[in-house]
Amino acid sequence: MKIARVTGTVTASVKAAPLTGHKLLVTDVEDGAGNVLEPAVVAADTCGAGVGDLVMLVTGSAARLPAAVAGVPIDAAIVAVVDHVDIAGGPAKRAPTRRRNG
């Protein structure tokens, strides 16, 4: 798993049929200090993330395991919205996220 920040959305009017109905988001993979390690990774959202959220990202064959995207031709999936990151020996990092209802 990787930590990533959602930076945008992807709209594709023409796509493989199994992708229909899936929200695609642009993410930047970050290190523990928030430095971008891998920019612009497109991921299928399985948990209602949005722009600005810090998320857990899975890639490769693991991305196709969550029930919401099982069998869908994806390479990356968002599987959690992160609330807090604590790095040993360093300052705790709060994950600024969108305000959520309930």
Image (cartoon, rainbow, N blue to C red):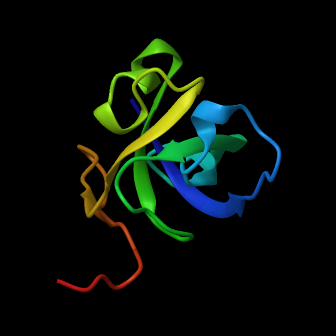
In percent of the image, x 39 and y 25: which residue is there? Answer: 70
Spot occupied by residue 21 in the image (x, y as percentages of width and height): 55, 51
Q: Quadrant of the N terminus?
A: top left
Spot occupied by residue 40 in the image (x, y as percentages of width and height): 73, 46
Q: Quadrant of residue 5?
A: bottom right
Of residues 58 and 47, the one drawn nearer to the viewer in this rendering: 47
Spot occupied by residue 76 in the image (x, y as percentages of width and height): 54, 32
In percent of the image, x 66 and y 34: which residue is there? Answer: 17
Q: Quadrant of residue 18?
A: top right
Left or right: where 83 falls relative to 72: left
Q: Is residue 30 visible?
A: no
Q: Residue furthest top?
A: 61
Spot occupied by residue 13 in the image (x, y as percentages of width and height): 80, 53
Of residues 95 and 92, the one drawn nearer to the viewer in this rendering: 95
**How many labels, in total?**
0
Left or right: where 67 falls relative to 36: left
Q: Residue furthest left?
A: 102
Q: Quadrant of the C terminus?
A: bottom left
Up-down: is 61 above or below 79? above
Left or right: where 101 falls relative to 2: left
